[in-house]
Amino acid sequence: MKSAIRILTALLIFTCSSVYADVYIGAGGYVTVLNEKISSHDVDDKDFAPAFFLGWRPIELLGVEVGYYDFGEFKGDNGESLKGNATTLVGLLSLELGPVGAYAKAGVADYSFDVKHPTSNYSESKTDPLAGVGLTVDLMDKLYVYAEYIRFDSDIDVDVAGAGLRYSF
């Protein structure tokens, strides 16, 4: 999965010079929320963490995006802690009405979690679906502010909500 994302990133950069397309980069801050049972112990916590992405929209309505989301660190009831992150590949469906736009995204996340218990530690990596919705506001011709909500649907479900800036080339 990670090599597919690297190949897609290279293709996005190469393609933008030869075809009219909206290529963009973005970064933001996200509140990540985890409410799970891990080894029969509750982990109900939230953290603030960054995310970065690169996208390509060959037409205004459709696009593809690769991204990295850091989930932060979560603390459990009995000393458990969990750190996680995900690399994503999503399709984007968007609609812009003047300076305001709305979008939905769906795709896959290659995620990794490190779980620490007082008595043992383990790591989990897997590829699972994600889906999200968001809004953008055009600040200047190529600079946008965005806000979005994403659900990472894995064995360990993570919800993220955040905002940030997106710049189109």
Image (cartoon, grey):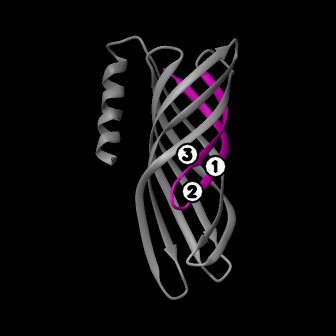
* N-terminal-most mark, 3 or 2: 3
Mark 1 — residue? 160
Q: Is residue 76 above or below residue 12?
A: below
> Could you give the CA–CA distance between mark 3 and mark 2, rounded to whole angstroms?
9 Å
Mark 1 and mark 2 in contact? Answer it, CB < 8 Å: yes
Q: Which residue shows up at 55% across the image and 78% down it?
A: 39
Magenta stretch: dominant secondary structure? strand
Which is more foreground, mark 1 or mark 3? 1
In the image, 132 versus 32, the foreground residue is: 132
Q: Mark 2 falls on what kind of element?
A: strand
Say whether disc 1 or disc 2 marks the residue closer to the N-terminus. Answer: 2
Q: Amino acid at mark 1?
A: Val
Residue sitting at x 52%, y 28%: 92
Where is residue 18 shown, x and y percent of the image? 32, 13
Which residue is painted at 50% across and 56% down in the image? 85
Q: Is 83 placed above or below 122 here? A: above
Q: Is residue 137 left or right of residue 125?
A: right
Q: CA distance from mark 1 to mark 3?
A: 10 Å
Residue 71 marker: 2
Q: Left or right of 18: which side holds 47?
A: right
For the residues labelled 1 and 3, say whether their Cβ atoms are less than 8 Å apart: yes
Q: How dense is the environment of label 1, judged by Cα within 10 Å: few (below 14), some, or many (20 and up)?
A: many
Question: Which of the marked residues, 1 or 3, is nearer the chain's N terminus?
Answer: 3
Residue 147, picture quadrant: top right
Residue type highlighted by circle 3: Ala
Q: Is residue 149 magenta?
A: yes
Magenta residues, start to end: 143-169
Residue 21, relative to residue 109: is it above or below? above
Disc on res. 51? 3
**127 sits left or right of 134 in the view:** left
Q: Where, by quadrant of the figure, is residue 103 drawn?
A: top right
Residue 147 within the segment the image draws in magenta: yes
